[in-house]
Amino acid sequence: MIEYRNLRVALLGAGSVGAQVVKLLLQHGDELAQRSGAGLELVGVAVRDLDAPRTADIPKHLLTTNAEELILGADIVVELIGGLEPARSYILQALNSGADVITANKALLATHGPELFEAAEQVGAQLYYEAAVAAAIPIIRPLRDSLAGDRIQRIMGIVNGTTNFILDRMDTAGESLEHALATATELGYAEADPTADIEGYDAAQKAAILASLAFHTTVPIDKVYREGITAVTLDQVEAAKKAGYVVKLLAIAERVTDPATGVEGVSARVYPALIARTHPLATVHGGKNAVFIEAEAAGDLMFYGAGAGGVETASAVLGDLVSAARRHVIGGPGVAESNNANLPILPIDRVITRYQITLSVVDQPGVLAAVATLFSEHDVSIETVQQSVAPLAPAERAGDTELGATLVIGTHQAAEADLSATVLALAASAVVHSVTSVLRVEGNE
Ligand code: HSE
C-alpha cells in the first residue's frame, strides 16, 4: 500500500456544486489520490449557514462559518461561493499564502481576472478555472494546453443553457419567448431572476474568459459587446427555420483585422444570430452547451456537453483538484496566464459579419431598385433576395396600393458599421414600411 502525502483542501461554499464536490471527493478519494500522487484531505467547508439544506450530506464536523481561518494552512482552496465579494478577497488571501486556487466563478474572472492571475504569479501558485465556462465541458484546458501551439481564428460558443433551452423550445415546439421562459423556470433551467441569462451577461462573462485565453490577450468584460435574446420573436425563429437557419445565442471570440486600419485585433461579442441548420452548433438542443473552435492548424473542433448542474460542474472542479495535486507533487511554480499577445480589442462596429434583414415594403415598380441602391451606397453587397407579396394592413395602404411585399435580404460579409448604417437608411426610406427583423448570420459562408 503506497503512503501518499496529504494535501489540505479547503472548500468555500456548499451550494449545488460544492455539496457534490464533497460527496465525490469523499466517495472517490482513494482513486483521486492514486491519480494525483497525493491524498486530498478535505479539511473543512466554509458556509454562511451551518444548518442550510444541502443537495448532498456533508459531515457536520467539516462545516465552518470562518472561511478566513479555513484558508490558513490549506494547500488548495476551492472557491464555489460565486459573486465578486467576498470571493475575491478569499482567493487573494489563499493565493497570497501560496495555496493553489480552484474557482468556478466566471463573474469574478471576467471582472478581476488580471488581479488574481498576477497574485498567483507573484507567489508561484496556480489559479484553475475549468468549471467557470460551460461547466462539465473541458474547454479551458484544451485552449490553454492542447491548442497552445496553434493559432485560434474564431470561437463560437453556445455557453448559456437557459437561453439555448428557450430558443430551442421556440424552434422545435413553436412556443413564444415568454412561454419558453416560463417552461425553463418550471423545469429549473432558469433562475427566479433570469436577467443574467436572457440579457446575455452570463454568456458575455464566458466570452471574456474564452477570448482572453484563445488570443493571449486580457479581454475585460466591459469590452464584450452584448445583446440578449429578449427581442427575439417567434416570427423570426419560424422565418429562420424556413430559410434553413436556427437562431442561437452565440458567444463569439474572433481574431479580426480592423477594416479601418488593417491592424489585427480581437472581437468578443454575444448576440442572437442565425446559423445554418447544417452547422454542428445547430445540433445543440435543450439546455446543452457547445463550443466550436476554428484553429489554423487543427481546423474545426467542437466540444459539447452539460454547461450547468451541480454534479456536472463538480466533475470539472475535481479535474482541477487532481491537476493542482499533481503540480504540488512535482513542485515548482505554477504556469502564468499567457497574455503576452496584448492585441487591441475592437469595438463591434469594426467586426466583419453578415446580416439577414426583413423589410415590409410597398409593392410598386422601382422599390427593389431603391432598396438595392441603399445597400450599395453603404458598400454592402447583397447575396440573396426573397420576396413574397401579400395584402397590406389598412393602416399601411397608400393611395391605390393594396399589396405589400416582404423582402428578406441576405448580405455578403461587410463591416458592421456599414451594415448598421444600411439598416438605418432602410428604416428612413419612403419605400420601406418597416424593418421587421435584423439578425446577424454566423458560421462560414
Ligand atoms: N445559468 C447558466 C446557464 C449556467 O443557463 O447556462 C451557469 O453559468
Image (cartoon, rainbow, N blue to C red):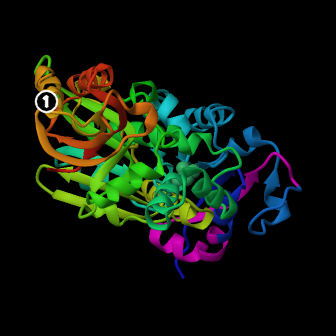
Q: Residue at x 16, y 27 (%)?
A: 375
Q: Nearer the viewer, residue 217 or 367?
A: 367
The foreground one among 379 and 282 is: 379
Question: Mark 1 — residue?
Answer: 366
Quadrant of the frame with the N terminus: bottom right
Determine if residue 159 is in view: no
Across and down, in percent, residue 361 comes to 29, 34
Q: Amino acid at mark 1?
A: Gly
Tell me which residue sits at (74%, 54%) in the image.
45
Question: Which stretch did the figure color magenta?
Answer: 24-50
The image quadrant of residue 343 is top left
Instruction: Please name the residue shown 58% across and 76% down the image.
Output: 30
Q: Eyeballing the image, is 188 above or below 210?
A: below
* Residue 41 counted in the magenta span: yes
Location of residue 209 in the rendering, given as x and y in whole percent from the top left corner: 41, 40
Does residue 64 appear to the left or right of 19 in the view shown?
Answer: right
- Camera-side residue: 257 or 388? 388
Residue 61 in view of the camera: yes
The magenta stretch spans residue 323? no
Label 1 residue SS: loop
